[in-house]
Image (cartoon, helix red, strand yellow):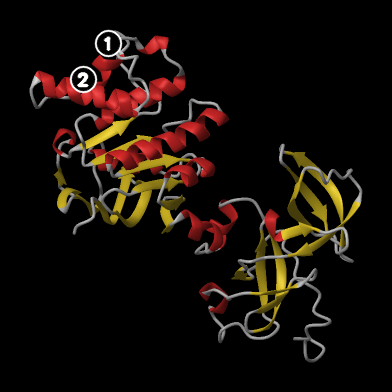
Amino acid sequence: MDPVLRFDSVSHAYGTVGVFHDLSFSLARGQIGCLLGASGCGKTTVLRCIAGFEPVVAGRILINGIEVARPGRQVPPEKRQVGMVFQDYALFPHLTVAGNIGFGLRSGSQAQRAARVAELLEVIGLAQSGGRYPHELSGGQQQRVALARALAPRPELLLLDEPFSNLDVEMRERLGQEVRDILKQQGTTAILVTHDQSEAFAVADEIGILDRGRLAQWDTPYNLYHRPANHEVADFIGKGVFLPGIVLEDHRIDIGIGKLTGDLPGECGKGCAGCERDCDVEVLLRPDDIVHDDASPLKARVVHKAFRGADILYTLALPDGREALSVVPSHHNHAIGEQIGIRVEADHVIVFRREARAGVVPLPRTSASSGPRPA
């Protein structure tokens, strides 16, 4: 079965200025995809190309196996069976909620159109609000109406452009889960763009990291976090710090505050025979990889703390002066400057071959170069 959306080496440019380059990915029926990246990386332009508002300069876009865009061919937006939810909702202020939802319905009898509107009002939790007007609704309710309006004609593909950016953090989290539930209930294939990682993780089945106009990785949220394809993806996703390490042998790395065991990814072996003993690497430690343990002989000094309710995010100075992050239950409330016990407990060891980077100082090589290392 053809994927609902397929990008084959697609590029876009404004004149001589490239926006994105050589994008290839696909989205299966019923899946929710996301393009995640910083402002200005080109993700909204990708949506505009899918919708038919912008031409492509290379490659091709297919929807349900039908080519809708390539250089010299541009299927009009109204022929693509694509719906869109805009950042600012774009509801019609003079129409009721029911009128907004039913606006795009052109086929079927009046009774069928009314039944579809009633169904979607129920789905979005506004069954009793069909006669109200947009200005009488909260921001979250307006966004649900905008979603229902886009879903009403049963599009083959739904596009969501930063759909929650106008809402507060708590509302974004709640509405993100609601939108995912609605899309899954309706069996809708969708792709959204956002700069918010938590939003992407809450909604999407697959996420593409767009970095300077190129697709760095298209994968599940789990793999992006635990198996990033490169240093840039690892640095972008989640919180963490890179610490220098030295390979002791296959699957074992010394990071100065402990020895870790894990798979050395392909990048670590580039240019060498599978990462030899004493090879310099960088290891990404997430805040949950460093565990607070009063009984541990390894101590770190608290240099910063961020209270987050159930937990505290500590910035810790390690014995050699490097810094790391640790997330600790908030009943462990330590003062700035206090020494606390820690231990490294990393289930997923994320390792990259060390390159020259500002601020990354290699470990001292005295022990690594003075004979056999301990196992």
Coordinates of residue 292 in the picture (x, y in percent): 80, 56
Residue 48 falls left or right of residue 250: left
Which amino acid lies under the numbered mark 2 shown in the image of this protein? Phe
Identify the residue at horizontal 46%, vertical 50% (top origin).
Answer: 212
Residue 62 falls left or right of residue 244: left
Contact check, label 2 and label 1, Cβ < 8 Å: yes
- Nearer the observer, 335 or 10: 335
Coordinates of residue 367 in the picture (x, y in percent): 82, 82
Position of the N terminus, as image quadrant, is: bottom left
Say which element carries label 2.
Answer: loop
Identify the residue at horizontal 80%, vertical 79% (top origin).
Answer: 365
The relative height of residue 44 versus residue 106 in the rendered view (above or below) is below
Could one spot residue 246 in this view of the protein?
A: yes
User: Residue under circle 1?
Assistant: 95
User: Residue under circle 2?
Assistant: 103
The relative height of residue 269 versus residue 119 in the rendered view (above or below) is below
Identify the residue at horizontal 14%, vertical 41% (top origin).
Answer: 75
* Mark 1 neighbour density, 10 Å: few (under 14) some (14–19) many (20 or more): some
Say which element carries label 1.
Answer: loop
- Nearer the observer, 108 or 27: 108
